[in-house]
Image: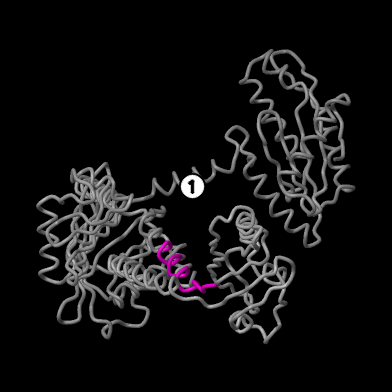
Amino acid sequence: MSTESKSRAGTSGADFSASEITRLMAELEQEGVKSQRYRLAAESATNLIYEWDLGSRVEWLGQVDELLGYQPNEIPRTWEGYTSLLHSEDRERVLAAVEKQLKSDEPYSVECRVKRKDGDYLYWQDQGTVVRDESGKPVKWVGAISDITKRKRAELKIASLAKFLSENPYPVLRLSRDGIVMYANAASGTIMDKWGCAVGGTAPPFWRDLAAQALANKKNETEDIECDGKVYSMVVTPVPEPGYVNLYGLDITARKQAEALFQQERESFLDLINNQPAGIYRLRVFPREQWRKDAWDSSEFPPYALEMVNDRFCEILGINRQLFESNPGFLIDLIHTEDKAEFARKNEEANTKLIPFQWEGRLIIGGKILWVHFESLPRPAANGEVLWMGILYDITERKRLAEKLEYSAVHDALTGLLNRHSLEEMLNRSIARAKRGVVSSLLYMDFDNFKEVNDTVGHTAGDNVLNTLSNILKAELRTEDVIFRVGGDEFAVLLEGTDGEKSQPVAERLRVAVEAHPFELERRVFHLSLSIGLIEIDGTLETGVLLSQADAAMYRAKEQGKNRVIMA
């Protein structure tokens, strides 16, 4: 198989255009003609004759060494010398055919691959017969070799091209000038069902007319067709000589669905915008050469004139219309100091490149922070000015909700401590630091006998106990030590920069503090304690394994009587 054929055989049909499909189909026909020519030539040509004495000796008539790239007489003139050149996958089949001929006089004709000296293979057709004496005993073997390499490679190329078309995931068809379906691959089945015809049948009138139109105009035509829940974009490509069209279908179902969804979302978005109160404004930005330095940083010489605002715009900013009319640049003064640079940069970029402007930032109004969202579109004027139509949203609540959600994602709702997700994230960083030489430790602990609290005085009291426990732990730890509520009555403490040996006194201090605290609830005293698993973070274990071993150490502490520290 040629390099070109190999690349096509491994290429998805989705990578080919309609014109390429047409080219490949034409090439398939051309290769078929070549293959027939090669076959006829091979059948009428003999390249080599050989005689085998049925022992070891083989005599060659013809340039066998030259044909296979060897020096004269370099190939051993033996039966083993010949058969050793056969492809390993063909050798047993050839020898079996020879044996059969020797026993039964059945015709011997095999196709096989023979290795050249450079490692390439030729395709040979070996036809032979056994010569017998008057008693019928085999005395020698006479064989004729025909080089059929060109024909075989043409056939392989045909098979590759045919496989590409037949296994293409998209429809490929051919219609004659009068609309007869000349070819249809397997993927065209749903289209053929819709048309109600098979190969050899006539396509529906619309497609016959489209084929005739493409041939008459000598240019591609495109038409969408929907069948069996899918939509195909069919490209009709004319082949004026000999007068047919190829149809190549691209599955555009996903694109059509996306377009419909986009249109639906767009309409919903427009409905939302048109039916909710939003600030609306129009301003005219002066030509760039009229701007003063740092034009967007001060209201003294604003680079724009504010032409129109609606009542909602004024309401959001807490000002009256007269203020805008007297000092349209005052908006710049409202921007939070930390956000002014980005506001100025985005304005300059939008006005220079004439691209949509969008900015979210903080305004200081009446001493309070207001989060707002501006967005506007440019309309250039002939005099160099740019008219901007835009809207303004108050997004303060959205920002507060986002901050709240962000907090909830990493914190335990009951105790306010960091949660398990945060623990895993921080452990990843601690492991990375440990690999650079900064060893840390993890205390993984369970609140002994806590179930007794929940079962006796209820979950509300249990929640209070967990909060008390978190406060006890905080009181005994450094500011840089981090406490986590992993879940239920399990807690963890990350001791950054503290190795296992130095962490043991810390773990013991926590254990003693909890043991010494009287948990009195509803005139009952509960004796609670901590079982702690301690593991050193030295960079050799990944997060999951480290947590698993710390948990196992904690459970060993419970199994050995609770209220103790066990090193993993």
Q: Residue furthest front?
A: 134
Which quadrant of the figure has residue 4?
Answer: bottom left
Mark 1 — residue? 403
Q: Is residue 544 left or right of residue 224?
A: right
The residue closer to the viewer here, 206 or 112, is 112
Q: Position of residue 427 (x, y in %)?
A: 70, 49
Q: Is residue 311 left or right of residue 24?
A: left
User: Which one is in front, 172 or 123?
Assistant: 123
Label 1 environment density (alpha carbons within 10 Å; few <14, some 14–19, many ≥20): few
Q: Is any part of residue 263 visible from this angle?
A: yes
Q: Position of residue 71 (x, y in %)?
A: 67, 86
Dominant SS in magenta? helix
Residues rendered magenta in the picture: 145-160
Q: Residue at x 62, y 59 (%)?
A: 98
User: Which quadrant: the C terminus?
Assistant: top right
Q: Position of residue 64 (x, y in %)?
A: 61, 80
From the viewer's side, name the closer residue of 234 and 89. 89
